[in-house]
């Protein structure tokens, strides 16, 4: 069976991805510095003899023994709060970490699947965003550390593809939520859930008219899996095109938790994108994929997770 190296293996997405690869019969070697990841995320998978996990910061030289078929580079702080708290590690893992991941792929004759982001589109002036859109990013703003690291990572991966003929797949991940989000990662969904469960006000930034398109983690992992085993290369948007305003999301979380919390309107972060919605024509055509979990259903399971895991 194939063998994958997964960086960021103990993160929100990395851990779900490891579980899926193991379920498909793959061998997995996972790395995570545990800067924002947590070993508990791998507790379901840790009994599996085909998983090996090492705590390791992949911005350091990456030494892998044995054959490798795919390197899946998922290591990075990924919520705005996390990358604002860790700007330099974010830049390093996007730049140097991608360089290490590509080095392993090249040495092993493997492919690279890069976890990229809708943030490469910045505060978009084209809506919804197709893969062909070049984006509208402020390189020197606070979010630039994440946006530009991922843009550099994409450029470097494509250079390795052109020069060394390495198969490169770039998944541009739009807002994703589900079990294993951290209570304090600062994102809208975990913030609203923890606030609603604690009976505290839901902090909507600005007037809440900005939009996001939320994809449930199981749908996202299905899209990534199909991309991995397809012939498709290059950038691929994976996300849910169903767009909601942030205020609507807050109200839905409040309703689903049965909370009586009020909504308060607070200051908007610098360079917070106004709209975000994936054009998933390519994923539909190449992978036959689209998100299927309704927001109410995905949020209900995330709330259930939060009630048990966050209070434990
Ligand atoms: N947001 C909010 N209240 C919060 C956290 C976030 O209104 O407590 C807003 C944030 O300003 C943005 C949207 O929700 O407009 C999504 O933010 P998130 O941090 O989840 O992800 P982003 O899409 O910005 O990476």
Image: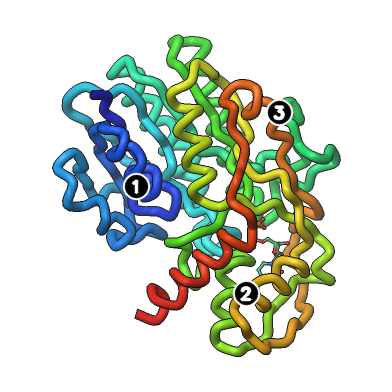
Mark 2 and mark 3: Cα distance apart in space: 31 Å
Q: What residue would you read off at disc 1?
A: 9
Image quarter in which the C terminus is found:
bottom left
Task: State left or right for residue 166 relative to residue 139.
Answer: left
* Disc 2 crowd, CA 10 A, few/some/many (<14, 14-19, 20+): some
Q: Which residue is located at x 21 percent, y 22 percent?
A: 67
Task: State left or right for residue 115 relative to residue 110.
Answer: right
Quadrant position of residue 64: top left
Q: Is residue 115 above or below residue 261?
A: above
SS for dot 2: helix
The spot of residue 140 in percent (x, y) is 70, 49
- The residue lying furthest to the left in this view is 49
Q: In the depicted view, which residue is nearer to us: 305 or 192?
A: 305
Q: What residue would you read off at disc 3?
A: 281
Observer able to see residue 15: yes
Q: Which residue is located at x 29 percent, y 44 percent?
A: 31
Total numbered circles: 3
């Amino acid at each position: 069976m194939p063998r994958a190296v997964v960086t960021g293996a103990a993160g929100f997405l990395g851990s779900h991805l490891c579980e899926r690869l193991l379920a498909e019969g793959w061998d997995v070697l996972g790395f995570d510095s545990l800067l924002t990841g947590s070993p508990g995320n791998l507790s379901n998978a840790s009994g599996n003899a085909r998983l090996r996990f090492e705590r390791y910061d992949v911005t350091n030289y990456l030494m892998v023994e044995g054959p490798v078929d795919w390197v899946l580079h998922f290591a990075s702080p990924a919520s705005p709060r996390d990358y604002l708290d860790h700007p330099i590690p974010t830049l390093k893992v996007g730049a140097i970490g991608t360089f290490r991941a590509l080095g392993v792929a090249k040495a092993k004759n493997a492919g690279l699947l890069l976890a990229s982001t809708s943030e490469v589109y910045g505060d978009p002036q084209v809506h919804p965003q197709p893969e062909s859109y070049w984006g509208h990013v402020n390189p020197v703003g606070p979010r630039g550390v994440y946006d530009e690291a991922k843009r550099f990572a994409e450029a470097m991966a494509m250079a390795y593809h052109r020069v060394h003929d390495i198969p490169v797949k770039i998944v541009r991940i739009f807002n994703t939520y589900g079990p294993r989000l951290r209570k304090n990662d600062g994102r809208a969904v975990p913030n609203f859930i923890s606030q609603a469960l604690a009976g505290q006000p839901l902090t909507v930034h600005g007037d809440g008219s900005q939009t996001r398109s939320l994809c449930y983690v199981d749908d996202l992992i299905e899209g990534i899996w199909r991309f991995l085993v397809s012939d498709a290369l290059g950038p691929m948007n994976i996300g849910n095109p169903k767009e909601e305003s942030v205020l609507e999301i807050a109200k839905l979380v409040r309703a689903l938790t049965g909370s009586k919390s009020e909504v308060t309107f607070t200051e908007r972060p610098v360079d917070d994108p106004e709209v975000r919605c994936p054009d998933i024509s390519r994923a539909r055509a190449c992978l036959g994929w689209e998100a299927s979990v309704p927001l109410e259903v995905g949020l209900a399971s995330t709330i259930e997770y939060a009630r048990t895991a966050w209070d434990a």
